[in-house]
Image (tube, rainbow, N blue to C red):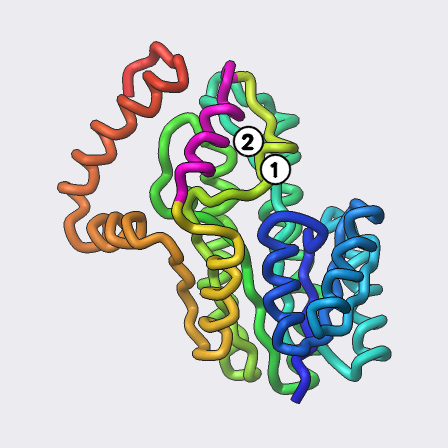
Amino acid sequence: MTQRVFVTGGASGLGRAIALRYAREGAKVCIGDINPEQGAGVEQEINNSGGEGYFVECDVRRLTDLEKICADLTEKWGGVDVVVNNAGVASAGSIEDTTMADWEWIIDINVLGVVRGCKAFTPQFKKQGSGTFVNIASMAGLMLAPLMDSYNVSKAGVIALSETLRQELRGDGVHVSCVCPAFFQTNLTHSMRSDIPGIQQNVNKLMKRSTITADQVADDIVRSVKKNDFWVLPHVKERRLWILKRYAPAVFDKLMYEESKRWMKKMGNKAKA
């Protein structure tokens, strides 16, 4: 059966990689994004890759956008199999320096955007008796490094929502996958908000050093959905650190303290870790 997939933030970065990965399997792929020019280009790329592309303008800050897309795809395709809640933004800063406006901005997109995606498509999934939510979180929501306060909280919120829905919807045949990558090459810093001088450049350097690509993360996601895995943790080193945190928290805390001091020094922050 041909897969029917919807990806928010699908016009660039990881969202585009996921859309094209499904397209190579012959899937019908709808991408929702606020950028119509890029969206139209990725729609054509999907068609060229062997899938059936469909772009719709979508702002995850509006529940009505997502509800309309669900109704549209249900009429067009007869349902949806996979919803990838990928759209997200980045921020960096301390609790003192991050403005409340930036807190509200990132929570509205990164957390409530995923909430809206799940809320809009859950009734259709229940009606079908099947469906998968792929919620894009981050290792930031598990590792919780300093000077990333609002971003960490937003991604931890996605993890908490995903774990909750995993149990809440299991009896309805609905599966949930929670994706927690670390640094990899993407365009996340383009919309990044921060008062820390040079933070975008530092994060971009870390992304460029990564041996993991967006295409590899997309491969992991597609494999995990097929296997009904909950956790998708593409980075080996960070995955091991997460296991250490769970089973030897005191050891992890000591390592994190030392790493945090180096990170804060690199960011030019004079506060004590």
Residue range in magenta is 196-210
The residue under the point 59% across, 22% down is: 99
x then y, percent, for residue 16: 65, 55
Secondary structure beneath dot 1 equals helix
Secondary structure beneath dot 2 equals strand
Disc assigned to residue 133: none
The residue under the point 49% across, 46% down is: 155
| Badge 2 amino acid | Ser
In this rendering, position of residue 12 left or right of residue 68:
left
In this rendering, position of residue 139 left or right of residue 272:
right
| Badge 1 amino acid | Ile
Specify the principal SS of the magenta part: helix
The residue under the point 60% across, 39% down is: 187
Query: Mark 1 = which residue?
Result: 106
Tell me which label, 2 or 1, sits earlier in the chain: 2
- Residue 202: in magenta span: yes
In this rendering, position of residue 31 left or right of residue 245:
right
The residue under the point 60% across, 61% down is: 18
Give me the C-alpha separation between circle 2 and circle 1.
Answer: 7 Å
x then y, percent, for residue 58: 79, 53
Residue count near mark 1 (Cα–Cα under 10 Å), binned few <14, some 14–19, many ≥20:
many
Residues at marks 2 and 1 touching, judged by CB atoms closer than 8 Å: yes
x then y, percent, for residue 112: 64, 49
Given residues 241 and 117, the one toward you in this image is 241
Q: Quadrant of the C terminus?
A: top left
Residue 140 to residue 55: above or below:
above
Residue 139 can be seen in this image:
no
x then y, percent, for residue 87: 64, 50
Query: Mark 2 = which residue?
Result: 91
- Residue 57: in magenta span: no
Q: Quadrant of the N terminus?
A: bottom right
